[in-house]
Image (cartoon, coloured by chain):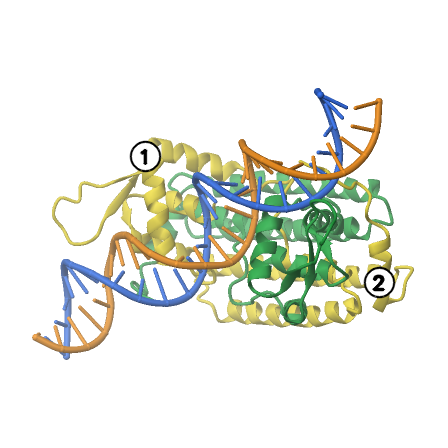
Chain colours: A green, B yellow, C blue, D orange
Amino acid sequence: MSVRHSLLALLSAGPKYGLQLGQEFEDSTGEVWPLNMGQVYTTLQRLERDGLVEGEDQSAAGPQKGFRITDAGRDELDTWLHTPPDRWAPPRDELVIKLLVAMRVPGADVVALAQSHRRHTVAMMHHFTRLKEEADPDDVGLLLVADAELFRLDAVVRWLDAAESRIKRLPTAPAEVQAAVNRRSRRRVGAGR
Amino acid sequence: MSVRHSLLALLSAGPKYGLQLGQEFEDSTGEVWPLNMGQVYTTLQRLERDGLVEGEDQSAAGPQKGFRITDAGRDELDTWLHTPPDRWAPPRDELVIKLLVAMRVPGADVVALAQSHRRHTVAMMHHFTRLKEEADPDDVGLLLVADAELFRLDAVVRWLDAAESRIKRLPTAPAEVQAAVNRRSRRRVGAGR
DNA sequence: CGACACATGTAACACGTTACATGATTTG
DNA sequence: CAAATCATGTAACGTGTTACATGTGTCG
């Protein structure tokens, strides 16, 4: 839902057309989070269908098709800005899932896997650190996104360390961790929605 | 892509059927990341179509339809386990985007917004802290997921603080931050893919 | 004119969610 | 038998990606 509302936010500063919105979005995120234009146009169509934006007169002019935010759109935007991300269903973290299910894979060396991912995460931190160093100091968007990534990656490293020691503390030998995990389970069979 | 590969991981410990896979996945994540069964069945269909799993004989028996992982499936699983999350397109963080685009919304008080989200994030940390305290100490999955969330939320709080001071340091008054942000932009017009 | 950048779109697909429909098995 | 539970699926929709198609405007 990020793109949909981001377009509303950009339109709240005045009418724009598709390509312009795509560029401003990428500018806002310092080009770290690219956006494909196809989605911009389909999202604009849905926003118009839902009455959150409306097409401009456009009378003459070239191929550009401007959009203006509506009052309903401003309401929606305001709500979104103040709504915190859902706490009960935080976004599934791919790396966390990877390690959790690896514990159920027979023969998988989860500790080695964690260390491998840790090395890669540290490498990513170097990348974003350099990105910050080389950035235009006025590019607030890029600096903020790089900050966010660095804090996030730091949390990943800390978690990998904590996970490693938790896993090592398990009653079974590391290579057969899954056996223990498999043994405990099988309660709460059948939720059925 | 998490669900697809998680199912492969669970099947690598032996043949299973749909509902069973759904339950084991939720067990693995300590019920923090729920999974809807509909997706499990459609994913299994795609996995079978792609030759990563195959249906079991099933001859007699009830409605249960077992699946077995194939050699191709084991290869795919192994690759996935060792592949780090893509570094060049990290998942878009909704909260980060929210603050970034809010800086372009005329009249938006970004600092107040950041503080509001900070409060909510701290509340979420309390929630997961309590979850850990009340958890079965043998439920490694739940403990690991709670750890991951706590580290992640801590990073969010740190980022919000850093972002707040960065925003306050901007040349323009907080309430008109967007004006400055709008002014700088509009370079690199037209990438055209 | 021809090449290139600007600008908008569509098609096909993967993944995810919600909601609904349908059998089979157990058990009061 | 009836109701609950177990188990599998489908339909409709939103979101996101990739790739392709198409038109317009400018400029050498």
Name the residue type under label 1.
Answer: Thr
Q: Residue at 83% of width from left, 56% of height from top?
A: B181
Q: The residue tagged with tag 1: helix, strand or loop? A: loop
Query: Which of the two marks, 2 or 1, is nearer to us in this view?
Result: 2
- The amino acid marked with disc number 2 is Val
Q: Position of residue B19 (x, y in %)?
A: 30, 56
Question: Which residue is rendered at x = 33% and y = 34% of the image?
Answer: B51
Residue at mark 1: chain = B
Badge 2 vs badge 1, beta-carbon distance below 8 Å = no
Task: From the top left corner, tell me how far across and down residue B100 is, in percent.
Answer: 74, 58
Does residue A186 sit above or below B41 in this rendering? below
Callout 2: residue from which chain? Answer: B
Q: Quick one: A84 or C9, which is closer to the camera?
A: C9
Task: Please give the label number shown on residue B70.
Answer: 1
Residue B138 or residue B91, whichever sits in front: B91
Q: Is residue B179 left or right of residue A153?
A: right
The location of residue B62, given as percent across then percent down, is 15, 54
| Residue B148 shows in this picture | yes
**Displayed quadrant of residue A122:** top right
| Residue B155 in view, yes or no | no
- Label 2 Cα neighbours within 10 Å, binned few <14 / some 14-19 / many ≥20: many
Indicate the secondary structure of the residue bearing disc 2. helix
B191 lies left or right of A176: right
Instruction: Residue D2: give x, y in percent of width and height.
Output: 13, 77
Question: Pointer 2: what residue?
Answer: B177
Between the residue at mark 2 and the residue at mark 1, the CA separation in whole angstroms equals 56 Å
